[in-house]
């Protein structure tokens, strides 16, 4: 998961608004940030590894003039952690296109070969997003060859259609095109979120924005219009007009993990409130906790993301809710930290138990998810040291058993604590006195209640069912052997290095 954002203003420079919007999306990626604006003649770009607040400063703000621009916060799922792979990415033909991407492309090996071999293009990085951009550029060029340069909109939409026919995986994308405008598109399954917003400016003219989550709109006075449809492309031209094109027929199957952990609770994704979904997850989990017959003194959330679920578990069971773990607000999300050793250390830095809420008590810890088990294992240990009598654990989502190939960096089975273990074995591994997992059907119910038109969710990390093509056993084996992107700290080309095709064959 990354965060993407684009704003097209009519009168004012856009940098400050993109900056503020990216701050609202920071939870989606903490490794790198980037913004590019278009002045009417030139692009102005700045990107680097780091948080939004650290990457941009007043000098950069002065340089990034222009009324239209796009931005990105990165949490890598392909390639490496190199600063050269921070987004946006650029190709200078046709038009000059910048691209930001949230998701993960699964047929990169074959597409990389085509780009380098058949189309004689050069790729500078190991990023899947750079491949996506080059395929898009090729396809727009193909359309220009047939239709001429007269109608950029026609060429862009035709290019997106052909790209969607060639690229597989998950992609929510915003592009900035010199002399044309800003175009967003979403893969035919709509796996990652993307929405459109509108604002009426002082002259009564309409201005538009795109963002991964609508939480990025309000801060700039935009109001959400709708989600981008799966398989749809939407262009906002430099005159401020919006055009939409259903490039290929889509079927919405959004990633259910967005509602569990990735998105902010104050966001609405595809018509579903993340917060309300989490409350419903609390109701179903409460039933299982009640049925377990465990004697529980207090319900304690693992801050931050498990709070809404735990609150509702407490309401539904009548067991008191207590804040037994204090979070150090200066340490970021640990799940998306690079490197396993780093993640384990940061759990301890991040959370501390309150002995008063532990001593002699039977506590039920609630977390939104248990992935590698780093977080909960350390917390169980902490609660025992703080004097808890019994430490029970409940996860608001089912066991994570399968790699995610659609934009969450959990590519290998072996790192998942639920892999190849029975419930009892997981409990022992985590050191808990009891362990309860949400049932998948209950999680699906909790999300679906928010929008009954959605027939299916992408639940691949829970059930191993991959809804797009090209996720073969072979692809998964390759992922298993190449490991997590965020562990490839020693595998980092520096900004400006070029990587050749053969080096990249293993990078998914
Ligand atoms: O089993 P693990 O591999 O440890 O991962 C699961 C944990 O990671 C996430 O929390 P994180 O600390 O990233 O962020 P949060 O503060 O938003 O809950 C998630 O909420 C779980 O607590
Ligand atoms: N998490 C994401 O959406 C990542 C986007 C892209 N695959 C990258 O690694 O940079
Ligand atoms: Mg957490």
Image (cartoon, rainbow, N blue to C red):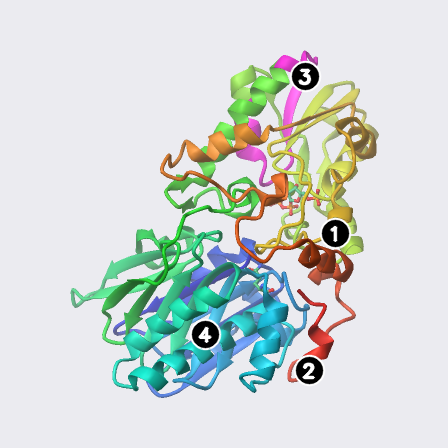
Name the residue beneath numbered marker 2: 500
Q: Are marks 3 and 1 in contact (CB under 8 Å)?
A: no
Indicate which disc, 3 or 1, sits on the residue closer to the N terminus: 3
Which residue matches tag 1? Answer: 343
Q: Is residue 302 magenta?
A: yes
User: Is 292 colored magenta in this rendering?
Assistant: yes
Q: Which residue is mark 3?
A: 297
In the rendered image, the vertical position of residue 43 relative to residue 243, given as above or below: below
Q: What residue is at 55 percent from the left and 73 percent from the top? A: 131
Look at the numbered discs 4 and 2 and tell me whether their residues touch, using CB distance below 8 Å: no
Nearer the N terminus, badge 4 or badge 1?
A: 4
Magenta span: 291-313
Q: Nearer the viewer, residue 415 or 472?
A: 472
Q: Point out the tag, 1 or 2, that comes first from the N-terminus.
A: 1
Q: Is residue 481 above or below residue 442?
A: below
- Marks 3 and 1, how far apart at CA: 30 Å
Q: Position of residue 60 (x, y in %)?
A: 49, 78
Q: Earlier in the sequence, mark 3 or mark 4?
A: 4
Question: Which residue bears the numbered disc 4?
Answer: 136
In this picture, residue 97 sits left or right of residue 345:
left
Mark 4–mark 2 Cα distance, whole angstroms, equals 20 Å
- Label 4 environment density (alpha carbons within 10 Å; few <14, some 14–19, many ≥20): many
The quadrant of the picture occupied by the C terminus is bottom right
Disc 1 secondary structure class = helix
Near mark 2 (Cα within 10 A), the count class, few <14, some 14-19 or many ≥20, is: some
């Amino acid at each position: 998961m990354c965060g993407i954002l684009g704003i097209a203003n009519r009168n004012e420079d856009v940098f400050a608004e993109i900056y503020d919007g990216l701050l609202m999306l920071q939870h989606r990626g903490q490794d790198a940030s980037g913004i590019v604006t278009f002045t009417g003649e030139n692009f102005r770009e700045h990107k680097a590894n780091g948080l939004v607040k650290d990457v941009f400063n007043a000098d950069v703000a002065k340089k990034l003039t222009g009324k239209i621009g796009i931005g990105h916060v990165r949490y890598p799922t392909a390639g490496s952690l190199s600063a050269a792979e921070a987004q946006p990415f650029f190709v200078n033909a046709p038009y000059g296109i910048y691209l930001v991407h949230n998701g993960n492309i699964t047929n990169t090996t074959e597409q990389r070969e085509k780009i380098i071999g058949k189309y004689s293009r050069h790729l500078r990085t190991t990023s899947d997003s750079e491949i996506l951009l080059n395929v898009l550029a090729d396809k727009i060029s193909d359309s220009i060859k047939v239709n001429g340069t007269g109608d950029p909109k026609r060429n862009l939409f035709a290019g997106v259609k052909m790209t969607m026919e060639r690229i597989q995986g998950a992609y929510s994308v915003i592009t900035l095109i010199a002399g044309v405008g800003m175009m967003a598109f979403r893969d035919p399954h709509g796996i990652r979120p993307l929405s459109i917003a509108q604002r009426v400016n002082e002259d009564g003219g309409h201005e538009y924005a795109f963002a991964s989550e609508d939480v990025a709109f309000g801060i700039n006075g935009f109001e959400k219009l709708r989600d981008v449809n799966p398989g749809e492309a939407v262009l906002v031209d430099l005159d401020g007009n919006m055009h939409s094109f259903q490039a290929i027929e889509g079927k919405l199957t959004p990633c259910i993990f967005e509602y569990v952990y990735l998105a902010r609770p104050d966001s609405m994704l595809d018509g579903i409130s993340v917060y309300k979904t989490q409350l419903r997850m609390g109701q179903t989990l409460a039933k299982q906790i009640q049925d377990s017959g465990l004697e529980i003194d207090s319900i304690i959330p693992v801050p931050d993301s498990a709070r809404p679920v735990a609150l509702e578990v407490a309401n539904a069971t009548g067991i008191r809710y207590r804040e037994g773990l204090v979070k150090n607000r200066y340490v970021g999300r640990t799940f998306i930290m690079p490197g396993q050793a780093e993640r384990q250390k940061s759990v301890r830095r991040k959370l501390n138990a309150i002995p008063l809420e532990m001593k002699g008590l039977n506590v039920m810890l609630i977390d939104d998810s248990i992935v590698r088990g780093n977080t909960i294992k350390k917390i169980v240990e902490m609660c025992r040291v703080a004097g808890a009598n019994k430490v029970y654990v409940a996860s608001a989502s089912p066991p994570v058993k399968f790699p995610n190939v659609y934009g969450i960096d959990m590519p290998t089975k072996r790192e998942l604590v639920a892999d190849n273990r029975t419930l009892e074995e997981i409990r022992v591994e985590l050191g808990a006195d009891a362990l309860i997992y949400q049932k998948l059907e209950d999680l699906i119910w909790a999300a679906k209640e928010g929008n009954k038109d959605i027939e299916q969710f992408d639940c691949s990390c829970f059930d191993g069912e991959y809804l797009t093509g090209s996720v073969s056993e072979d692809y998964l084996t390759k992922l298993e052997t190449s490991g997590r992107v965020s562990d490839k700290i020693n595998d980092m080309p520096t900004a400006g290095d070029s990587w050749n095709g053969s080096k990249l064959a293993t990078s998914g």
